[in-house]
Image (cartoon, grey):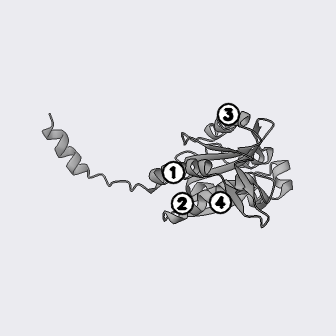
Amino acid sequence: MTILTLAGSPSQRSRSSALLRHAARRLESLGLKTSEIGLHDIPAEDLIEGRYTGAAASALRTRVHAASAVLIATPVYKASFAGGLKAVLDLLDEKALIGKVVLPLATGGSPAHLLALEYSLKPVLSALGARHILAGVYATDKEVSFDDKGQARIEDAVRARLEDAVERLAEHVGRPTPAVDLGQLALQARFSV
């Protein structure tokens, strides 16, 4: 079981990617395998031209298909998620997120953009078939910063919300599916009348 982390920031060093990587480390500490793909893993020409048949788009779809869950991180610009992330999502199959647990993460300049997850990103995720979208985590630029060595610093309150969201995700994907004994079910149904 793999959890795919999707970094939607055009910046190599971004606050939203810092949240994403912290979440991935936490998932791995819980024994879950993660794998990251991001905007920089797909050629710009493929994104701009929407090359659905390109090798990078095909690899993206394969990785999304194989994942049990998807964490999607994005910066918020002008009250919406990043346009580059939208270009990535446009390369997915129409119902690529069916049966997957999805956890959206975002960072933005102020608390005023908190609802960008609800009103801009979640409808796109729903259009891709996601029916189990967990409550997202949003942080302001002041709550996620970088020290002079480039190490991310996440405020305690945001870290707590992020780790709580990761725990919820782990519960959903980490639960073993019980085997159904059809004979036992038939006996129970027969004697429960």
What is the C-alpha distance between the residues marked 3 and 4?
22 Å
Residue 94: give x, y in percent of width and height: 65, 43
As drawn, 134 above or below 112: below
What is the C-alpha distance between the residues marked 1 and 2?
9 Å
Residue 62: give x, y in percent of width and height: 64, 58
Task: Check contact, mark 1 vs mark 3: CB within 8 A.
Answer: no
Q: Nearer the viewer, mark 1 or mark 3?
A: 3
User: Which residue appears at 49% of the width and 52% of the height?
Assistant: 167
Labelled disc at residue 115: 3
Which three-letter amino acid code belongs to the residue tagged 1? Leu
Which three-letter amino acid code belongs to the residue tagged 2? Leu
Which three-letter amino acid code belongs to the residue tagged 3? Leu
User: Which residue appears at 76% of the width and 51% of the height?
Assistant: 52
Residue 153: give x, y in percent of width and height: 69, 58
Per the image, label 3 sits on a secondary structure element best described as loop
Q: Is residue 11 left or right of residue 178?
A: right
As drawn, 107 above or below 25: above
What is the C-alpha distance between the residues marked 2 and 3?
25 Å
Mark 4 lies on residue: 21
Mark 2 lies on residue: 27
